[in-house]
Amino acid sequence: MKTITTPDGVEIAYKRTGSGPPMVLVHGSWTSHHGWDDVVEALADSFCVVVYDRRGHSESQRLAGQGSINEDVADLAILIEALGLAPAWVVGNSFGASISLRLAAMHGELMRGVIVHEPPLWELICDDPDLIDLVEKDEELTVKVADLIASGDCEGGARFFIEYELGPGSWSQLPPGFRATFVENAPTFLDEARDPDQFGFDSAWLTGFEKPAMLTVGGEGSPAYAGVVLRLTEVLPQAEVVRFEGAGHVPHMTHPEEYVEATRSFVARHE
């Protein structure tokens, strides 16, 4: 891994592989660039792929004090500019999808297009009576996990999160390295949970973004994510919506071949 240094002194670790149009992959909460391992090699056959650890995750540094999603957006912009990738395809999952969409809104000139899976932008659906219960449950989960981490029980917080999402006993079935990454990055999840802008988003921010966009959901995912995607299509009429049947919140890990094929096909139609 190589590093770049942000203006506030944070070293961001990244890795570049392959050749072709540049593509930056933005991971979600808890994980690291290794979350993309199942798709990087295949994507690198067609693209210059850059993966990185967001600030506070694994090999990248974190600062003391409260962070913000806006810092993540700034880091992504700096990475693209520092490596000479602009304009790049930006691909994000979960919280990484939220970061990617904010970059599209703020610095669309840095992007060829955007591909995002299930951004937790709950502010977009907080007025939907059919979805508000799901949003409240997710927020309750975040509070419970944050409380455990804040008490010093990083492993307990990570375990609670995984077993809530995947079912009782699922934590012990995960590979040891995966569990270790979750525990290591738990303090940054706490930081994200305390960020008042974590779930916020004004869809009007994207009104001027006219570049290609692909919004994806998992067939086994929460209906709340489908609701978010529906709201996004109202301001991104050019967006294509793809549903990965049988997949959940991380299709690039559970259905890597389908994910790569959908990504390649979409880009090929717009390059």
Image (spheres, helix red, strand yellow):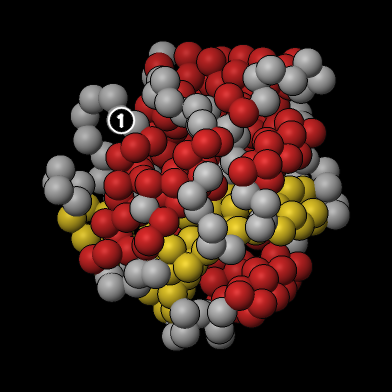
Q: Is residue 178 above or below residue 198?
A: below
Q: Is residue 131 visible?
A: yes
Residue 161 located left or right of residue 251 = left
The x, y position of residue 4, in whole percent, is 21, 60
Q: 175 or 252, which is in the foreground? A: 252
The x, y position of residue 152, in whole percent, is 39, 19
Dividing the picture into quadrants, the one containing residue 125 is top right
Residue 131 located left or right of residue 47 = right
Quarter of the image where the N terminus is located: bottom left
The x, y position of residue 206, in whole percent, is 51, 44
Q: 9 or 217, which is in the foreground? A: 217
- Give the residue at x 26% y 57%: 78
Q: Is residue 163 above or below residue 102?
A: above
Q: 242 or 156, which is in the foreground? A: 242
- Give the residue at x 26% y 39%: 62
Quarter of the image where the C terminus is located: bottom right
Element type at mark 1: loop
Mark 1 neighbour density, 10 Å: few (under 14) some (14–19) many (20 or more): some
Q: Is residue 225 visible?
A: no
- Give the residue at x 79% y 54%: 243
- Give the residue at x 47% y 39%: 205
The x, y position of residue 233, in whole percent, is 68, 45
Question: Mark 1 highlights which residue?
Answer: 67
> Looking at the picture, which amino acid does disc 1 mark?
Gly
Q: How many marks?
A: 1
Q: 46 or 124, which is in the foreground? A: 124
